[in-house]
Amino acid sequence: MRLVGLPRVGIVGGGQLCRMMIEAALPLGIEVCVLRRSTDESTSWWGNSVVGDLGDPDAASRFAELIDVATFDTEPSSLAPLADLVATGVELRPGPFTFRYTDKARQRRLLGRAGFPVPEYVILRSPAQVGDTLKLWGGPVVWKAATGGFDGRGVLMTDDQREAESFVAGCQSVVVAEPLLALDLELAVLVARSVTGETMTYPTLITEQVEGMCHTVVMDPDLDPVLDRRARDLAVQIAHETDSVGVLAVELFLVGGQLIINELAPRPHNSGHLTIEACVTSQFEQHVRAVAGLPLGDTSPLHPAAVMVNIAGAADPTGDGLAAALSVGGDHVHLYGKTARPQRKIGHVTSVGHDVSALRARAQRAATAIEAGAGPGQPAVGATTGATDK
Amino acid sequence: MRLVGLPRVGIVGGGQLCRMMIEAALPLGIEVCVLRRSTDESTSWWGNSVVGDLGDPDAASRFAELIDVATFDTEPSSLAPLADLVATGVELRPGPFTFRYTDKARQRRLLGRAGFPVPEYVILRSPAQVGDTLKLWGGPVVWKAATGGFDGRGVLMTDDQREAESFVAGCQSVVVAEPLLALDLELAVLVARSVTGETMTYPTLITEQVEGMCHTVVMDPDLDPVLDRRARDLAVQIAHETDSVGVLAVELFLVGGQLIINELAPRPHNSGHLTIEACVTSQFEQHVRAVAGLPLGDTSPLHPAAVMVNIAGAADPTGDGLAAALSVGGDHVHLYGKTARPQRKIGHVTSVGHDVSALRARAQRAATAIEAGAGPGQPAVGATTGATDK
């Protein structure tokens, strides 16, 4: 039975972002159907789902019959299956126009041409171009596959020609090369845009990477308010330029006081997980509101400061480690139902309050307890056993 | 696939309390299986479920195989099926000992005998006892079916002998009669108790009934702190006395400065819905933590004041009314996925902030917009059509 009055929302991909979208959609009474791969553990318990992916015409057409609008847990690897979905009459939020910008080469070209601040870049189609590229700027170069990379995969930082050539040769897509910049900070702005073009931005966040993967995100009350405003204004312009619907994550470099665009993700994003506790309306509620055509919500912070730390795990996250983390008090643990494997993001912890360094210590302690799979002072059971199949 | 380390949690009954327990269990990575009736709309989209009830031995045994511990969205109508579940090795949290207290007659006897403050009462087994009962106190009497009543059903307030006799004759259980008290306030305390007997209480809440059904709940910063402390202490004593596990709702009368026990509900309760936004750990997260054997969470308020208003509806809650309610800003809407029918609770709105009267007006405005099924100033589409079957 479907409640009338709201579109039925399809989510393509059943990972943790989908899981947290469902958590946000349930209180609003929004009907959600998930198109998930059989390996998507985060939403395996969701009844209203179709197993398969957009590249599978049978699954895609069954999915299309159950929904009115579709949104995405994962960027589609190509735009062709999106067109098939559009042809069924399903409305995509965001649509193919926006997804052009998730190709890193296309994003640089389109945004650069429109006058947006992008880094210097070269697009390589062959390893033979690596030598000349290395001569351009001097010093290390960042090599990024235009499509398919995430969490540090598909990215290499080196000034070694052989290593770079081998990386370029191994990529399925063209490669974007950029000089390694001396960053003052890495920032992220979550901007929500409605189907009618209204926008709301969240406070600018500071993101900290470890080995190319987001590790810690900070909402810092001491961030320069002028910088905050500039970053938010830039994100709004990009949301309009890319015709985004729902949440768009804009990752920025701060270099010598200048904001430069790093990456775009047209969906809720790891940098915005702390909005669940830190802001009136979370990025997930905001996204499903926009996708369902409901008014955007208030993005004001509920606390002066917040820190999120990812849990990347090898140990079972639901054992004694969880109990230890929850006994810290005031930390908010989010687990994604995923089997633990080394370096795999399986959850996050958010702490909210006043003092960034205290919150950082608290959230990190809770995340470490879960990663270790045991309480403080106890042996980290399973922490070194690697991938398991339980 | 099941993550090891936490018990698999079964929830008996798939109504809105179960829905909100699932919303709280998901972030903690707790596996939930629901035993739901085919008519339970609030959780019809939950994949991991068994359709049936505890009285159906086949459904109950399939349910028992999928879980390690069980808790309850709805009080069982009798204790016998609980014993069958216990016999399968499933641990009940709370267990049959606690459920004795949801029988209003038994509750009065057990708590009165243990020295707890209960109202004067008489237990009637036959309409023939009504006449004498009416002579006892003078003035109107409250007649309550000992079991099976909720939201004002199973309760009558009258000094008319014929009316009372007819009510008693129609009840499936014995009837508790009590003098109608002149209430200063109705209060509720949510107390959480772990399997190891730790307790945590939430701030004492003021509840307001309309036609016997909870309408508004207020967390009021001006509530006398001595009264708050007395009510919380009393609730803790009752939690220990009843051997409760998880959240226990203790509804209290304040009469001439004295606290008197009204009703107990050994589960998350309508009076505690505002804890989702108003407190660090919601009553639902608290309940699933306790049931799963995890540490209890911080119950501190995040805001000085909060007001919850129920949505009891006849109109489709997901139409223009939802959009109008969400455009108010700062209100938190919770819909339960239930088909609207007159007087049926289909959701609630919580507003948090500083000023109770402003919050009350805001939450009521949002609830009214949803109940009317249309934005302010627009016709209330469907508001007078009564029950529908969409």
Image: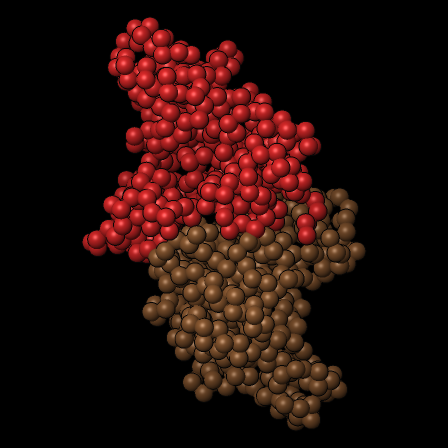
Chain colours: A red, B brown
Looking at the image, is B310 positioned above or below residue B259?
above
Point 70% across, 56% down: residue:
B340
The answer to whether A2 appears left or right of A154 in the picture is right
The answer to whether A117 appears left or right of A364 in the picture is right
Point 49% across, 38% down: residue:
A283
> Residue B172: x, y in percent?
66, 82
Q: Residue B42 falls in which quadrant of the image?
A: bottom right
Point 38% across, 46% down: residue:
A339
> Residue A270: x, y in percent?
42, 36
Q: Nearer the viewer, residue B90 or A335?
A: B90
Q: Nearer the viewer, residue B390 or B296?
A: B390
Looking at the image, is B45 positioned above or below residue B263?
above
The answer to whether A145 appears left or right of A98 in the picture is left
Looking at the image, is B154 positioned above or below residue B294?
below
**Res. A383 in view:** yes
**Res. B215 in view:** no
> Residue B246: x, y in percent?
43, 66
Point 51% across, 21% down: residue:
A101
> Residue A67: x, y in percent?
65, 40
